Image (cartoon, rainbow, N blue to C red):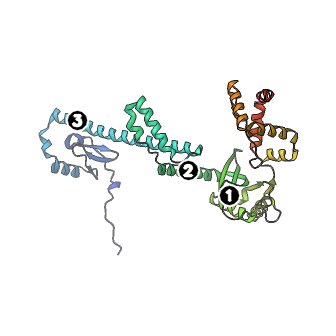
Amino acid sequence: MASVNKKRKVDREGRRFQDKWKFEYFFTEIRNNCVCLICQETVAVFKEFNINRHYQTKHASYDKLTGNKRGEKVKQLEAVLTAQQSFFTRVRESNENATEASYEVATLIAKHCKPFTEGEFIKDCVMKMVEKICPAKKQEFANICLARNTVVRRIEDVSLDIKRQLEAKGTEFDFFSLACDESTDASDTAQLLIFLRGVDNDMNVSEELLDLQSLKGQTRGTDLFVSVCSTVDDMKLQWNKVTGIITDGAPAMAGERSGLSSLVCNKVSEEGGSAIKLHCIIHQEVLCAKYMKYDNVMKPVIKTINYIRSKALCHRQFQQFLLDIQAEYGDVLYHTDVRWLSRGSALQRFFSLREEIGQFLTKK
């Protein structure tokens, strides 16, 4: 015969705190717990027998308080307990504010590409300002931790949170496309940037940097494809929703057989989707500049810039000339073919200072 479980379910008995226990036993209810006002211990069950036993065992001396004196004592003990709770609440809120401020500063450090050790310098500056402006708040600002390791952890937490948000947004996309660009940084490490543009059912278009993959070895089409697959799978995106892949015109990207775009399109077809491949629409400015070949503009500009900046004396005189006439800018910019984006910056600066440059060269 099966044994019958006769264990009582206290939480199903519907026991509730009774107001009379406050006056009789110095007990109150806090967050569904029965708490003694005298010693602040908690009784597990809302049961008068347990409360009475606690009172008679530990606080029987309070029986001499009767009438108004007993009521005043209850109010006094309640006020003390409330003050303690308010203190701990303020401390908790202060700690939460300090943590939130630490995250905000770490986010700014990451956005401006500053070293992680800048957090300690920022805190020193803030403490000096607080000492002069609001000394009473000095301890609250001192509780903000901006140590190097803390800043690293904060930035990692922010990065993971952004990734989770992107994953959640990616599940709502009906279709999306990828754009890939590969370049080499100053340390000769190949960096593959993967961008995502997706649209949901409400026609809301989102464009985000999906990932930045570092390639330590070769940068063949298959190597790039492995990195793209790793990113798409890690973000839990569905391959059959890919509608296109956009790259530059490099063979590793746009190759007909083993290029990244061809491999991605084949992968999408295997998953039941259809994707188109486009190339040479990412860096439109440099492509236009390359094929227009407007040497009649660039050669005189570069020659003038080199004339001003190649000789130290001439460069100092030009800077002083701009300072004397209070020009908008204090110098011209160099342009190098390796950093092709500098072409536009150099031309824009030269055009802004064209009148000042003409006056300076006339005097020379």
Front one among 247 and 149 = 149
Q: Horizontal placement of 304 versus 20: left or right?
A: right
Q: Please state which of the two labelled residues, at mark 3 or mark 2, is closer to the viewer.
A: 2
Where residue 90 sits, quadrant-wise, is: top left
- Estimate the spatial distance between the alpha carbons at disc 1 and disc 2, rounded to whole Å: 30 Å
Residue 102 appears in view: no
Q: Percent x, y for residue 289?
A: 83, 44
Q: Which mark is residue 188?
A: 1
Q: Percent x, y for residue 22?
A: 24, 41
Q: Which mark is residue 161?
A: 2
Q: Percent x, y for residue 270?
A: 75, 65
Element type at mark 3 = helix
Q: Residues within 10 Å of mark 1 (few under 14, many from 20)?
A: few
Q: Which mark is residue 76?
A: 3
Q: Horizontal placement of 147 versus 256: left or right?
A: left
Name the N-terminal-most of marks 1 and 3.
3
Front one among 213 and 344 = 344
